[in-house]
Image (spheres, rainbow, N blue to C red):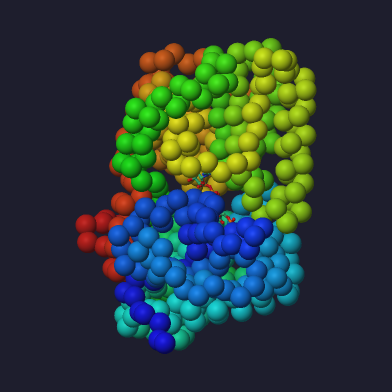
Amino acid sequence: MTAPTFDLVIAANRLPVDKEVAEDGSVEWRRSPGGLVTAMESVMRGREAAWIGWSGDAGDPPEPFEENGMYLVPIGLTEDEVTNYYEGYSNDTLWPLYHDVIVPATFRRRWRSSYERINQRFAEAVSEVAAQGATVWLHDYQLQRVPALLRAIRPDLRIGWFNHIPFPPVEIFMQLPGRETLLEGLLGADFLGFQVRADAANFREACRRLLHSTVKGEVVTAPDGRRVRAAAVPISIDVEELRALATSPETLQRAKEIRAEMGDPEVLLLGVDRLDYTKGIRHRLKAYGELLADGRLDPHKTRLVQIATPSRERLQAYRVLRGQIEQTVGRINGDHADFEDTPVLYMRRSFPKEEMAAIYAAADVALVTPLRDGMNLVAKEFVTCARDDAALVLSEFAGAAGELKRAYLCNPHDVDRLKQTITAAISAPIDERRKRMRAMRRAVLSNDVHHWAEAFLASLQAAPELPAGETDR
Ligand code: ADP
Ligand code: F6P
């Protein structure tokens, strides 16, 4: 039977749902973790499209299937390919390199060849379901070779790629063995989207320095002479939907219950992250532990809820981090807890959307303190759901800081300043917190996820020119 074809094809490393096999062998599909799926889920609702991605499980891929009106095409990865392409090259080479080398990047030649093979597999899978002249939207650092590989088999397609993570300065990117191959891979696209302008500029500079490409404004000339636009299109969330959920009577009631279940603390601090070394959880806990030890926060009146969802658990750096975090949580609670009060509530569970909205609405201060982050949707979700008098402590190294300028901005590497920023946010006059929150809410409202998707697709259609109505920057 021939596969159906689509005018819009999405490809990302993962499908929006992950396959989970229960002990009795039954298969369940669960929402995949991370910001990419959060954003694309609401954008794709109601659009007729195919989504190509890995099912999250090693072995033969399941047959294509339909979910929420989308045609999902699972890509199979063997155990070795999971090790080499996903855990190795994607998450132990590119991930640390693209996040300012917070941990050292590892370079292995066999990982690179696996990445190339899997990118070829994605390109072929896209080609099979893409209608003549279709629009193809590729996502993220795991698929940087796909644009060129796909163009080689399907020159009729309009190809766009969006990077959900930072793109590093050329001085760091240069460390990557075979770095030119990735740039050439990306230049197979018509339009390349980045989270912030500095990322797009870093990419163009890498092309100029390493490929000797001509760069004019936002347009890079590819080795085959095509002109490719590389520009910022900051990602966002479904503000209207989330705001409606967060302000519903049920959510507000649940938010009250959450506080009551914790003994109605005077100050409720909140962290929500994938358990990743980029997120700065260790620095945050250190600052909080010291504030309790210094007596600047009262362990009987303060709670920190730290939600840290497991991620990439077979990688050494993630296992080490988990150990450090759990030890620190244990130490803080060991030093300060009594029969009534536990200063850190640490949870690894995944929560449904309704409960997440209630947790955000319950908090007084969110601590979003990544050491480096492409955007950080948690910051935007908090601003959307929080009470007007709540406060956001936000790292200068999160892409979101470019839009949420009225957050309590901090450098998470500087633990003393981080402590000062946390106490400033807690003790700020209510009027000041309200003003800041209102300004941040306006910023989030002016660029929601639908605006993001439309801006990306319009740029892709118009590339290398600017879409109608957009002026040069
Ligand atoms: P990343 O893409 O690096 O994981 P983001 O902050 O951009 O980081 O996106 C994380 C997404 O995952 C957000 O939409 C957030 O609400 C969601 N999320 C994080 N932790 C949980 C959890 N424990 N349960 C449910 N959703 C979660
Ligand atoms: O954008 C960052 C990212 O790698 C996404 O590709 C993904 O949504 C998320 O983080 C979770 O990562 P993983 O798919 O490796 O669990």
Looking at the image, residue 74 lies above or below residue 343 = below
- Point out the quarter of the image occupied by ligand 2: bottom right
| Picture coordinates of residue 335, whole percent (x, y) | 77, 20
72 left or right of 415 in image: left
Residue shown at the point (51%, 21%) measured from the top left:
259
Residue 58 at least partly seen: yes
In the displayed structure, does residue 112 sit left or right of residue 473?
right
Q: Nearer the viewer, residue 230 or 161?
A: 161
Q: Looking at the figure, which quarter contains the N terminus?
A: bottom left
User: Residue at (77%, 27%) from the top-left corner?
Assistant: 331
Where residue 419 appears, as percent x and y from the top left, is 63, 23
Residue lying at the far front of the rendered structure: 24
The location of residue 205, given as percent across then percent down, is 51, 62
Q: Quadrant of the C terminus?
A: bottom left
Quadrant for residue 79, please give it. Answer: bottom right
Question: Is residue 198 in view?
Answer: no
How far across and down, in percent of the image, does residue 118 sit? 59, 75
Q: How many marks?
A: 0
Residue at 66% x, 55% y is 312
396 vs 311, left or right, is left
**Which residue is painted at 76% across and 29% down in the image?**
330
